[in-house]
Image (spheres, helix red, strand yellow):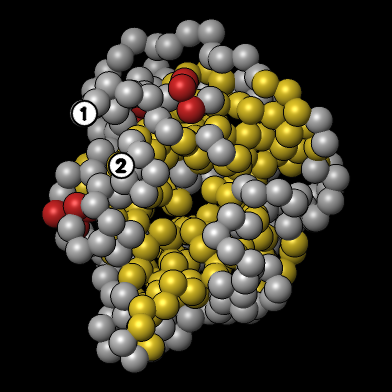
Amino acid sequence: MTTEVISRPERILPHRKIQIERFSNNPLLIPGPNSSWMSTRVFNCGVIQDDDGLYKMLFRATFHRGNIAYSNSNLGLALSTNGIEWDVLSTPVLRSGFNQYSIRGIEDPRIVKWVNGWYYIFTSAVPDKGPNVVRIGIFRTKNFHKYEWVGIPFHGIANSAAVFPELIGDNAFLLHRKYPHIWVSRTQDISLQNGWKDNQIVIRAEDLYPSPETGITPRKIGMAAPPIKTPKGWLVLVFAAHGKRFEEVYSIGFAVLDLHDPTKVKYIHPNPILWPEKVYEMENGKRGICYCCAAVESPDKESFYIYWGAADRVIAGGRLMKEDLIGICY
């Protein structure tokens, strides 16, 4: 696999104030203290709107067994008619230990409806070999109750991944994080199992916005929600982690990639569009975490609903208005 550093974006458009408007009923999902599988944390969810208009959420959950808090992550399923109020199924739909790649957990799902009609779920698969062996693990489903293992696109530590929801030219393109930057790879295999090549940096950590608190650029960045096609480019929400390891503040920003060549960056927004500041983002978990894996169109088509894990303990959401993106994406 070749490695090439892609040039930085040639220009940054004029600054404008763009912010995600938090839902008034946040947090949307919280742990169930009496649950056998989601008693300690529910966070980092993928969301998709099905063909019938129903919103479906896969979320990461951890639990207690006796007095011990287990870090093994299972994925639960929640359903919604409006994308704001959610009903949670009583049992997880994807459990840690699904295969040898996910013995310690299936984490941080991102959902894409792929060109073959299947829903593909891009996860962080954690085997039972220590903390630094996370791989991109791909599953697929048609009904969100039965799942098939697709595979690992390439070996090596990587996560925060998803494909663009359509072929671009003859290629499927995969965005992912390999510390500390966002990378892109491609394949002509529409099964997404083989042939990944041209592993390239597409956005560098230092290209993203500095912390509004310290003025320092991020320690690491990654793709947040799967790419969204807009008239002027692929809208890619990103996360940025500022600060020392284990003390990072995670926030949300965005960039726009070229419609016909997603290795080209057209725009990087110079400020975060969501910075942790609410109580549910700052307390009762890991302080200062807004970690996003999902964005879907709202029922009225006027905004995108954005979802994030808050303080690594609950799930929150908000709106990003399309009118705020005029001149950048529209």
Q: Earlier in the sequence, mark 1 or mark 2?
A: 1
Quote the CA–CA distance across marks 1 and 2.
Answer: 10 Å
Q: Quadrant of the C terminus?
A: top left
Local packing at callout 2 (Cα closer than 10 Å; few below 14, some 14-19, many 20+) is many
Element marked by disc 1:
loop
Residue drawn at x 62%, y 71% is 128
Q: Position of residue 145 (x, y in %)?
A: 57, 79
User: Would you say 89 lies left or right of 171 here?
Assistant: left
Q: Which mark is residue 40?
A: none
Residues 35 and 230: in front is 35
Residue drawn at x 51%, y 63% is 107
**Residue 237 can be seen in this image:** no
Q: Position of residue 63 (x, y in %)?
A: 38, 80
Say which residue label 1 marks: 213
Give the amino acid type for the residue marked by disc 2 in the picture.
Answer: Val
Q: Position of residue 296 (x, y in %)?
A: 43, 49
In the image, residue 322 above or below residue 278: above
Give the amino acid type for the residue marked by disc 1 in the picture.
Answer: Glu
Image-quadrant location for residue 191: bottom right
Element marked by disc 2:
strand
User: Would you say 280 lies left or right of 41 here?
Assistant: left
Say which residue label 2 marks: 249
In the image, residue 172 above or below residue 143: above
Residue drawn at x 14%, y 54% is 279
